[in-house]
């Protein structure tokens, strides 16, 4: 596979950090494994500094680690570092990169002393829950800012495919609040369905660019899922976290409006379940959506941490995991999505996609259920806080039919509701107070 360097939006956030911090803080780029952190940071160091030192703690030598054991003589520290890496460092023009810093927490603790010295900039990358699990005996530096790197969003995916204009057209349509027309929308949905299938993991996108072969892409995604499975098994020896992760697609198909861990791992103490869910969330491999007991502006204040839904952070991985025990030719989601025939029974793929896009645009995830008076529940798939109002979002995997849950919610909480959205597959239009939104516009909500 040829190496592709993709344009990522976090690069601009790193530029702002470099300009505004001016050496007063380090920055930690967090994200799931294989999401592109190391590539991004190396590219930034090469482009934006006169020189840089890379310390990869996944394979650092004994000598490289030993220099962090005593920082009482900072001059000697830098002398040893320059000798080990054979790199000349320039005051305020060089950066030192701590890659996979979770592998050696002592280096992360050293950030405080190094930042106080002020000569150079410091960028860290960290993967998986171990970045937090491995810091029990160290002091977390307060001089550390954190940036999250998610899977490639739709615009980044389009950039990777050489398309620099489609998202500008989508934004223009959003600003005008006028759709493209059915023919252009059908073409836009075909493009977007490809993103749903390939996903936003850089390795999978690279494989698609090189081969245009979804079977080859599926193999890459399976290797990433195996990596995640192994990580969970290493950190949770009981295997329960791994089992919960693997059960996400099946859990989303049930009609109970919440994830039910006991059906996967048996009866388990609530505190242990809470720890497992936190571990999964902390790994950045999943997005957790909590029930809001009182849907108001402060959604987090009423969130119910015993009622939640769990989505994969990348929908491309989700498509592969949903048919984990079948070979690529038997994964009907690929064929159904490509032919625009997903159907209601596979609508949870769209729900996972909307969750991913809302997170990528800076939202935390909440949902709401309430009784309909006939021993059933209405459910609003997502709630977003906007100013002093709540914006409800309902997701449909097909064209517009009805949005009863959304209507009842807006009637029940009329004074709290701002804009209301139904995300679906057809063109942008208005249905009384509800904005009917093609799914590729979700990130603009």
Image (tube, grey):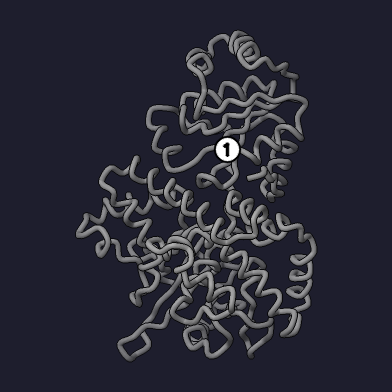
Q: Is the residue 434 above or below the residue 223 in the image?
A: below
Report crowding for label 1: few under 14, some 14 to 19, many 20 or more residues within 10 A (C-alpha).
Answer: many
Residue at image x 69%, y 24%? Answer: 120
Q: Is the residue 22 above or below the residue 436 in the image?
A: above
| 90 relative to 149 in the view: left or right | right
Image position, residue 170 (x, y; %): 74, 71
Residue at the spot of label 1: 28
Image position, residue 247 (x, y; %): 35, 61
| 303 relative to 174 in the view: left or right | left
| 236 relative to 54 in the view: left or right | left
Q: Is residue 25 visible?
A: yes
Secondary structure under tag 1 reads strand
Image position, residue 179 (x, y; %): 74, 81
Q: Nearer the viewer, residue 212 or 254?
A: 212
Which quarter of the picture shows residue 264?
A: bottom left
Q: Is the residue 77 above or below the residue 344 in the image?
A: above
Q: Is residue 303 visible?
A: no
Q: Nearer the viewer, residue 73 or 102?
A: 102
The residue most toward the left is 267
Total marks in image:
1
């Amino acid at each position: 596979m040829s190496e592709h360097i993709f344009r990522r939006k976090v690069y601009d956030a790193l530029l702002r950090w470099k300009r505004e911090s001016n050496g007063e803080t380090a920055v930690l780029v967090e994200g799931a494994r294989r999401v592109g952190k190391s590539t991004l940071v190396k590219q930034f160091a090469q482009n934006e500094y006169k020189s840089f030192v890379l310390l990869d703690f996944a394979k650092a030598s004994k000598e490289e680690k030993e220099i962090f054991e005593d920082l009482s003589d900072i001059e000697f520290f830098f002398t040893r570092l320059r000798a080990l890496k054979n790199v000349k460092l320039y005051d305020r023009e060089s950066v030192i990169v701590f890659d996979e810093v979770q592998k050696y927490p002592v280096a992360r603790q050293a950030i405080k002393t190094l930042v106080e010295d002020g000569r150079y900039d410091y960028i860290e990358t960290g993967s998986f829950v171990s970045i937090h699990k491995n810091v029990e005996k160290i002091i977390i530096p307060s001089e550390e800012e954190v940036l999250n790197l998610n899977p490639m969003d739709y615009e980044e995916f389009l950039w990777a495919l050489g398309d620099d204009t489609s998202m500008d057209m989508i934004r223009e349509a959003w600003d005008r609040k006028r759709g493209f027309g059915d023919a252009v929308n059908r073409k836009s949905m075909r493009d977007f369905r490809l993103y749903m299938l390939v996903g936003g993991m850089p390795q999978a996108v690279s494989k698609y660019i090189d081969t245009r072969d979804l079977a080859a892409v599926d193999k890459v995604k399976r290797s990433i899922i195996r990596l995640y499975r192994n990580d969970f098994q290493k950190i949770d020896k009981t295997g329960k976290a791994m089992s919960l992760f693997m059960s996400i697609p099946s859990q989303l198909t049930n009609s109970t409006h919440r994830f039910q861990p006991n059906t996967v791992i048996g009866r388990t103490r609530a505190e242990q379940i809470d720890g497992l869910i936190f571990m999964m969330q902390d790994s950045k491999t999943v997005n957790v959506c909590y029930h809001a007991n009182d849907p108001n502006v402060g959604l987090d204040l009423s969130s119910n941490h015993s009622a939640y839904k769990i989505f994969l952070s990348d929908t491309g991985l989700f498509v592969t995991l949903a048919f984990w025990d079948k070979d690529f030719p038997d994964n009907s989601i690929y064929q159904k999505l490509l032919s625009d025939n997903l159907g209601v029974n596979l609508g949870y793929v769209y729900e996972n996609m909307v969750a991913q896009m809302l997170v990528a645009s800076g939202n935390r995830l909440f949902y709401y259920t309430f009784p309909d008076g006939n021993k059933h529940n209405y459910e609003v798939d997502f709630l977003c806080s906007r100013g002093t109002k709540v914006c409800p979002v309902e997701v449909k995997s097909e064209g517009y039919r009805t949005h009863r849950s959304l209507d009842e919610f807006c009637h029940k909480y009329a004074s709290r509701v701002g804009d209301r959205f139904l995300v679906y597959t057809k063109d942008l239009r208005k249905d009384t107070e509800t904005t009917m939104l093609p799914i590729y516009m979700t990130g603009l909500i």
